Image (tube, grey):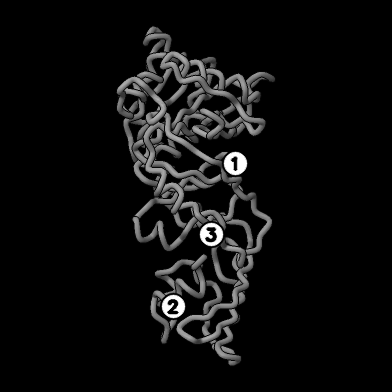
Amino acid sequence: MKFIRNNSLNPYFNIALEEYCLENKVNEENFFIIWRNKPSIVVGRHQNIFQEIDYEYIKKENILVVRRISGGGTVYHDLGNVNYTFIFNRNDNDINYEIHNYKIMEALSILNINTSMSKRHDILLDDKKISGNAQRIHKKHVLHHGTILFDTDLVKLEKSLDVKNNAIYSKATKSVRSQVTNIKENMCEDMNTEEFQEHLIKILSNDYSDDEILLTDEDFFRINKKVNEKFMKWEWNYGESPKFTVNKHVDNDNDIWDVKIIVNNGLILECNLIKNGKEILYNLTGLRYEIDVLDANICGLTKNDIYCLFFKN
């Protein structure tokens, strides 16, 4: 199968590359991309990001957030996680998850990594998840992509996605958490992530016998245009979250707060704060539901107070 070699570690560029290739690079050819991201959260197209992440933790750890173009659940990426993307001309078989997953499973079997597939189409190793996947259809083309946990920091993965926030109510698609493991710790062969990534390219390209597709300067220009105009935008990554309501009863430094906030398109529609039985008036309507914006517009509360009242799980 033909392939694009993508050395970028920038999640905004990499998600933009997928969309660009789906919309522009499929004619009669099917191809794949193998790629990695620096530490980042990749949220599903129809998800409420605030229900999926530990907001305070990812801010503290400078973990990036990007919304992808496919559905499915939120995932954590880092340099120990290898991602694959297949882009095909559409036919009845191409929307079959098993066909594409088996390509990855066969490549893993060459390394004596024997896997199975769950009813949810996750790839499992010893009944633990090593790969989740999703699809996006555009006109006559289909994109099938997924993650492979090779040597990911599972502690950061767990902390980033450790959300117990029952105070947020929305109709957004919620992620289903699974037990996970890394491939590397289950391998006899000594291999680093870069070598594993190259192994996948070699196998899927039939030992490099299939052609590499080279991106032109025009391609890069148009991909970076998508990065700047869409995928790096707060309005896409956070603002595309479905409408939600926050209802909280908080004991913060011996003050009792009742908080009700309605957010749509990432913007506050209504905000009612009651402290020790007394209504506190802040004009927050129309502001982004974002920590730095709220900190700049709320007097008398520290940033830690705002985390506690608005974002803390």
Give the amino acid type for the residue marked by disc 1 in the picture.
Answer: Gly
Q: Residue at x 42, y 29 (%)?
A: 183
Q: What number is the disc on residue 305?
A: 2
- Circles 2 and 1 in contact, beta carbons < 8 Å: no
Mark 2 or 3: in front is 2
Which element is circle 3 on? helix
Residue 224: in sight, yes or no? no
According to the picture, the residue beneath numbered tag 3 turns out to be 50
Q: Are marks 1 and 3 in contact (CB under 8 Å)?
A: no
The Cα atoms of the two marked residues, 2 and 1, are separated by 33 Å
Taking the image as shown, residue 138 lies to the left or right of residue 153, namely: right
Relative image position of residue 45 (x, y in whole percent): 57, 45
* Label 1 sits on residue: 72
Q: Residue at x 63, y 67 (%)?
A: 245
Residue 221, percent from left and from top? 36, 36
Compare residues 151 and 37 and report the one nearer the observer.
Answer: 151
